[in-house]
Protein backbone atom coordinates (compact mmCIF):
# COMPACT_ATOMS: atom_id res chain seq x y z
CA UNK A 1 0.00 0.00 0.00
CA UNK A 2 1.10 3.55 -0.59
CA UNK A 3 2.40 5.69 2.20
CA UNK A 4 0.37 8.36 3.92
CA UNK A 5 1.45 11.92 3.37
CA UNK A 6 1.21 14.17 6.41
CA UNK A 7 -2.32 14.69 7.62
CA UNK A 8 -4.21 13.42 4.58
CA UNK A 9 -4.60 10.23 2.53
CA UNK A 10 -2.19 9.35 -0.24
CA UNK A 11 -4.19 10.37 -3.29
CA UNK A 12 -4.01 9.36 -6.94
CA UNK A 13 -6.03 10.38 -9.98
CA UNK A 14 -7.01 7.57 -12.34
CA UNK A 15 -8.48 8.61 -15.69
CA UNK A 16 -8.59 7.62 -19.36
CA UNK A 17 -8.43 10.32 -22.01
CA UNK A 18 -8.35 10.74 -25.76
CA UNK A 19 -5.06 11.56 -27.46
CA UNK A 20 -6.06 15.25 -27.31
CA UNK A 21 -6.68 15.12 -23.57
CA UNK A 22 -10.49 14.88 -23.49
CA UNK A 23 -12.21 12.67 -20.91
CA UNK A 24 -15.50 12.70 -22.85
CA UNK A 25 -16.95 14.26 -25.98
CA UNK A 26 -18.55 17.69 -26.37
CA UNK A 27 -21.99 16.21 -25.57
CA UNK A 28 -20.53 14.86 -22.31
CA UNK A 29 -21.60 11.33 -23.17
CA UNK A 30 -20.41 8.42 -21.01
CA UNK A 31 -16.83 7.73 -22.09
CA UNK A 32 -16.60 4.11 -23.22
CA UNK A 33 -13.49 4.41 -25.38
CA UNK A 34 -11.13 2.61 -22.98
CA UNK A 35 -10.18 -0.99 -23.76
CA UNK A 36 -10.52 -4.10 -21.64
CA UNK A 37 -6.92 -3.52 -20.53
CA UNK A 38 -7.80 0.00 -19.38
CA UNK A 39 -10.80 -1.27 -17.42
CA UNK A 40 -8.56 -3.83 -15.71
CA UNK A 41 -6.04 -1.08 -14.96
CA UNK A 42 -8.77 1.09 -13.43
CA UNK A 43 -10.06 -1.80 -11.33
CA UNK A 44 -6.53 -2.55 -10.09
CA UNK A 45 -6.06 1.05 -8.99
CA UNK A 46 -9.45 1.18 -7.24
CA UNK A 47 -8.80 -2.17 -5.56
CA UNK A 48 -5.53 -0.90 -4.09
CA UNK A 49 -7.30 1.94 -2.24
CA UNK A 50 -9.49 2.31 0.80
CA UNK A 51 -11.89 4.62 -1.03
CA UNK A 52 -12.67 6.25 -4.38
CA UNK A 53 -13.90 9.83 -4.70
CA UNK A 54 -15.74 11.25 -7.71
CA UNK A 55 -17.90 14.23 -8.56
CA UNK A 56 -21.67 14.33 -8.89
CA UNK A 57 -21.50 15.09 -12.62
CA UNK A 58 -19.42 11.99 -13.20
CA UNK A 59 -22.00 9.91 -11.36
CA UNK A 60 -24.92 11.50 -13.23
CA UNK A 61 -23.27 10.78 -16.60
CA UNK A 62 -22.40 7.15 -15.91
CA UNK A 63 -25.09 6.23 -13.38
CA UNK A 64 -22.75 3.65 -11.83
CA UNK A 65 -19.35 3.18 -10.29
CA UNK A 66 -16.82 0.38 -10.81
CA UNK A 67 -16.84 -2.27 -8.07
CA UNK A 68 -14.00 -4.72 -7.62
CA UNK A 69 -15.02 -7.99 -9.27
CA UNK A 70 -11.78 -9.75 -10.28
CA UNK A 71 -11.14 -12.69 -7.99
CA UNK A 72 -7.41 -12.00 -7.66
CA UNK A 73 -8.03 -8.39 -6.66
CA UNK A 74 -10.65 -9.44 -4.12
CA UNK A 75 -8.15 -11.95 -2.72
CA UNK A 76 -5.49 -9.25 -2.45
CA UNK A 77 -7.87 -7.02 -0.51
CA UNK A 78 -8.66 -9.90 1.84
CA UNK A 79 -4.95 -10.54 2.40
CA UNK A 80 -4.50 -6.86 3.25
CA UNK A 81 -7.42 -7.15 5.67
CA UNK A 82 -9.44 -4.62 3.76
CA UNK A 83 -13.18 -4.75 3.23
CA UNK A 84 -14.24 -6.54 0.03
CA UNK A 85 -15.09 -3.22 -1.62
CA UNK A 86 -13.56 0.24 -1.22
CA UNK A 87 -15.84 3.03 -0.06
CA UNK A 88 -17.27 5.03 -2.98
CA UNK A 89 -17.63 8.70 -2.06
CA UNK A 90 -19.77 11.08 -4.13
CA UNK A 91 -18.87 14.77 -3.93
CA UNK A 92 -21.97 16.94 -4.37
CA UNK A 93 -22.43 20.32 -2.71
CA UNK A 94 -26.12 20.37 -3.65
CA UNK A 95 -26.82 16.73 -2.78
CA UNK A 96 -29.01 16.67 -5.90
CA UNK A 97 -28.67 13.06 -7.04
CA UNK A 98 -31.27 10.76 -8.56
CA UNK A 99 -31.95 7.95 -6.05
CA UNK A 100 -32.95 5.73 -8.99
CA UNK A 101 -29.44 5.65 -10.40
CA UNK A 102 -28.08 2.10 -10.60
CA UNK A 103 -25.23 3.23 -8.35
CA UNK A 104 -27.59 2.99 -5.39
CA UNK A 105 -28.17 -0.72 -6.06
CA UNK A 106 -24.52 -1.62 -6.53
CA UNK A 107 -22.88 -3.72 -3.78
CA UNK A 108 -20.43 -1.04 -2.58
CA UNK A 109 -20.24 1.10 0.58
CA UNK A 110 -21.53 4.59 -0.32
CA UNK A 111 -20.65 7.89 1.35
CA UNK A 112 -21.69 11.42 0.42
CA UNK A 113 -19.55 14.53 0.77
CA UNK A 114 -21.87 17.53 0.77
CA UNK A 115 -23.00 20.69 2.54
CA UNK A 116 -25.62 21.11 5.26
CA UNK A 117 -28.12 22.02 2.55
CA UNK A 118 -27.19 19.01 0.43
CA UNK A 119 -27.48 16.69 3.43
CA UNK A 120 -31.12 17.68 3.87
CA UNK A 121 -31.92 15.93 0.58
CA UNK A 122 -31.04 12.60 2.19
CA UNK A 123 -32.55 12.94 5.65
CA UNK A 124 -34.33 9.74 6.58
CA UNK A 125 -32.88 7.85 3.60
CA UNK A 126 -30.46 4.95 3.87
CA UNK A 127 -28.80 5.42 0.49
CA UNK A 128 -25.51 6.46 2.10
CA UNK A 129 -23.77 4.78 5.00
CA UNK A 130 -22.15 8.08 5.99
CA UNK A 131 -22.74 11.72 5.07
CA UNK A 132 -19.78 14.06 5.50
CA UNK A 133 -20.76 17.72 5.82
CA UNK A 134 -18.40 20.55 4.90
CA UNK A 135 -19.74 24.09 4.61
CA UNK A 136 -16.65 26.15 3.75
CA UNK A 137 -17.37 28.78 1.09
CA UNK A 138 -17.05 29.20 -1.82
CA UNK A 139 -15.88 25.59 -2.12
CA UNK A 140 -14.89 22.65 0.01
CA UNK A 141 -11.91 23.08 2.33
CA UNK A 142 -10.01 20.09 1.00
CA UNK A 143 -7.38 20.10 3.74
CA UNK A 144 -10.15 19.75 6.31
CA UNK A 145 -12.05 17.17 4.27
CA UNK A 146 -8.97 15.01 3.70
CA UNK A 147 -7.93 15.23 7.34
CA UNK A 148 -11.39 13.96 8.23
CA UNK A 149 -11.11 11.10 5.72
CA UNK A 150 -7.75 10.09 7.17
CA UNK A 151 -9.29 10.08 10.64
CA UNK A 152 -11.99 7.73 9.33
CA UNK A 153 -9.40 5.18 8.22
CA UNK A 154 -8.93 6.18 4.59
CA UNK A 155 -5.18 6.06 4.02
CA UNK A 156 -5.24 5.63 0.24
CA UNK A 157 -7.71 7.42 -2.02
CA UNK A 158 -8.43 7.19 -5.76
CA UNK A 159 -9.91 10.17 -7.63
CA UNK A 160 -12.06 9.09 -10.57
CA UNK A 161 -13.10 12.46 -12.01
CA UNK A 162 -14.27 14.75 -13.22
CA UNK A 163 -12.01 17.53 -14.34
CA UNK A 164 -13.41 20.16 -11.97
CA UNK A 165 -12.74 17.96 -8.96
CA UNK A 166 -9.22 17.14 -10.16
CA UNK A 167 -8.50 20.84 -10.70
CA UNK A 168 -9.66 21.83 -7.24
CA UNK A 169 -7.61 19.07 -5.61
CA UNK A 170 -4.49 20.01 -7.58
CA UNK A 171 -4.94 23.64 -6.56
CA UNK A 172 -5.20 22.52 -2.92
CA UNK A 173 -2.05 20.41 -3.17
CA UNK A 174 -3.96 17.20 -2.45
CA UNK A 175 -2.83 15.00 -5.37
CA UNK A 176 0.24 12.75 -5.16
CA UNK A 177 0.08 10.72 -8.37
CA UNK A 178 -1.71 10.59 -11.70
CA UNK A 179 -2.42 7.43 -13.70
CA UNK A 180 -3.49 8.39 -17.21
CA UNK A 181 -4.47 6.11 -20.07
CA UNK A 182 -4.08 7.72 -23.50
CA UNK A 183 -6.59 6.17 -25.89
CA UNK A 184 -6.21 6.22 -29.70
CA UNK A 185 -8.89 8.69 -30.75
CA UNK A 186 -9.35 12.45 -31.12
CA UNK A 187 -12.53 13.97 -29.68
CA UNK A 188 -11.95 17.70 -30.03
CA UNK A 189 -14.62 20.22 -29.09
CA UNK A 190 -14.16 23.56 -27.36
CA UNK A 191 -16.35 22.57 -24.43
CA UNK A 192 -15.42 18.89 -24.18
CA UNK A 193 -13.98 18.41 -20.67
CA UNK A 194 -10.33 17.61 -20.07
CA UNK A 195 -8.66 15.89 -17.13
CA UNK A 196 -8.14 19.29 -15.45
CA UNK A 197 -10.90 21.89 -15.72
CA UNK A 198 -11.55 24.87 -13.44
CA UNK A 199 -9.83 28.23 -13.99
CA UNK A 200 -6.54 26.71 -15.05
CA UNK A 201 -3.01 27.55 -13.93
CA UNK A 202 -0.53 30.06 -15.23
CA UNK A 203 2.66 28.48 -16.57
CA UNK A 204 4.58 29.80 -13.57
CA UNK A 205 2.16 28.23 -11.08
CA UNK A 206 1.25 25.07 -12.99
CA UNK A 207 1.78 21.83 -11.04
CA UNK A 208 4.88 20.02 -12.24
CA UNK A 209 4.98 16.28 -12.83
CA UNK A 210 7.68 13.63 -12.70
CA UNK A 211 7.22 10.78 -15.15
CA UNK A 212 7.39 7.46 -13.29
CA UNK A 213 6.48 4.88 -15.93
CA UNK A 214 5.29 4.42 -19.50
CA UNK A 215 3.90 1.24 -20.97
CA UNK A 216 1.82 0.47 -24.03
CA UNK A 217 -0.74 -2.26 -24.53
CA UNK A 218 -2.04 -2.60 -28.09
CA UNK A 219 -2.98 0.96 -29.06
CA UNK A 220 -3.16 2.51 -25.59
CA UNK A 221 -0.41 4.17 -23.56
CA UNK A 222 -0.44 3.95 -19.76
CA UNK A 223 1.35 6.82 -18.02
CA UNK A 224 2.05 7.34 -14.35
CA UNK A 225 3.32 10.58 -12.84
CA UNK A 226 4.26 11.90 -9.44
CA UNK A 227 3.14 15.41 -8.63
CA UNK A 228 6.23 17.39 -7.64
CA UNK A 229 6.07 19.24 -4.30
CA UNK A 230 4.99 22.86 -4.72
Image (cartoon, helix red, strand yellow):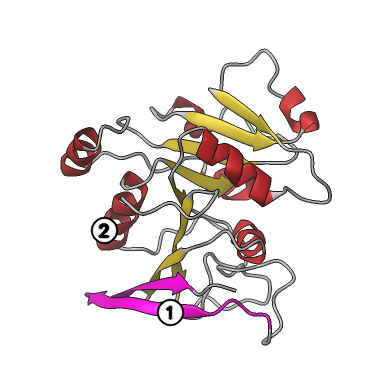
Percent x, y of residue 181? 38, 69
Question: Left or right: where does residue 136 sit relative to residue 132?
Answer: right
Q: Is residue 211 magenta?
A: yes
Residue 184 visible? The answer is: no
Up/down of 40 relative to 25, above or below = above
Disc 1 from disc 2: Cα separation:
27 Å
Up/down of 133 relative to 219, above or below = above
Residue 36 numbered mark, or none:
2
Q: The residue tagged with tag 2: helix, strand or loop?
A: helix
Percent x, y of residue 40? 27, 54
Residue of label 1: 210
Up/down of 87 relative to 120, above or below = below
Residue 141 visible? The answer is: yes
Q: Which residues are magenta?
A: 205-227
Q: Residue at x 52, y 53 (%)?
A: 6
Q: Residue at x 63, y 49 (%)?
A: 57
| Residue nearer the viewer, 101 or 168 | 168
Amino acid sequence: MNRKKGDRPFTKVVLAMSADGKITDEARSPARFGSTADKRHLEEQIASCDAALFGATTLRVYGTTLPVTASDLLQQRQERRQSPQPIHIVCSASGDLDPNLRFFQQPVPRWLLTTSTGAQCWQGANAFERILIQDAAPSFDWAEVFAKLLGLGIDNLAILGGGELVASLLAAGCIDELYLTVCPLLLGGRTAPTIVEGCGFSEALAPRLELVSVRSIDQEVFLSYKVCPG
